[in-house]
Amino acid sequence: TYLRGVVPSEMPPSWHPEALKAQTVAARTYALYSLAAFPRAMESSVADQAYKGSDAWSIAANRAIDATKGEILTFRGKLFPAYFHSESGGRTTAIPYVWPKKENFEVIESVKDPYSVYSPYQNWQSRLSPWEISEAFRKAGYNFGEIRTLQVLKRDPTGRATVINIIGSPAVKSFDGN
């Protein structure tokens, strides 16, 4: 029942049946791994898996769910955290750069993603004023006053920021890229 609300929320039901099956197996595995590793309620957002409940149900997704019943991914006999994304930016990032405190399954490594060039989200921009950035940090419990500079101090092999320095009028602090 959970997957019936997840699969069509994560992938358009109009996509190829085999793609829906692959998404179903990944979503099932991710849910089982997450609940076993971190017993808690899962978020119904991209923090875990998008979930729109019975409003999202579709015949195509339900067929994929039924066709893959019981299928999961494992690595060396253990449940595998089947992370997935909607857009990689052309290359995925290895787990230690994204979640340094999570178990590092060496099979999850950085790979090229030639299909992301077809994504409508491949290229995007976001412009924030220094005041908007300061305000967002203030709401998160940090007071930088007027932000003067953002510096990328370290990057992972894909070019993504892993350490960022924020220089404000009364404070300077480093944050991880996430």
Image (cartoon, rainbow, N blue to C red):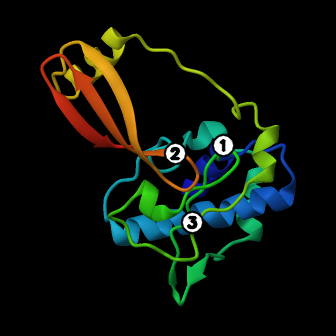
Of the image marks 1 and 2, the number of the one nearer the N terminus: 1
| Viewer-nearest residue: 140 or 36 | 140
The picture quadrant where one finds residue 75 is bottom right
Residue at the image position 79 percent from the left and 41 percent from the top: 117
Placement of the C terminus among the 4 image quadrants: top left
Position of residue 156 relative to residue 38, above or below, is above
Position of residue 45 relative to residue 23, above or below, is above
Left-right relation of 120 to 176: right
- SS of the residue at dot 3? loop
Q: Is residue 1 visible?
A: no
- Callout 3: 10 Å neighbours few (<14), some, many (20+)? many
- SS of the residue at dot 1? loop
Q: Nearer the viewer, mark 1 or mark 2?
A: 2
Q: Which mark is residue 89?
A: 1
Position of residue 67 relative to residue 27, above or below, is below
Q: Nearer the viewer, mark 3 or mark 1?
A: 1
Q: Amino acid at mark 3?
A: Ala
Q: Which mark is residue 64?
A: none
* Residue that numbered label 3 is attached to: 82
Residue at the image position 55 percent from the left and 56 percent from the top: 157
Q: Residue furthest left?
A: 170
Q: Amino acid at mark 2?
A: Arg
Left-right relation of 167 to 30: left
Residue 130, x across and y down, in percent: 35, 12
- SS of the residue at dot 2? loop
* Residue that numbered label 2 is attached to: 160
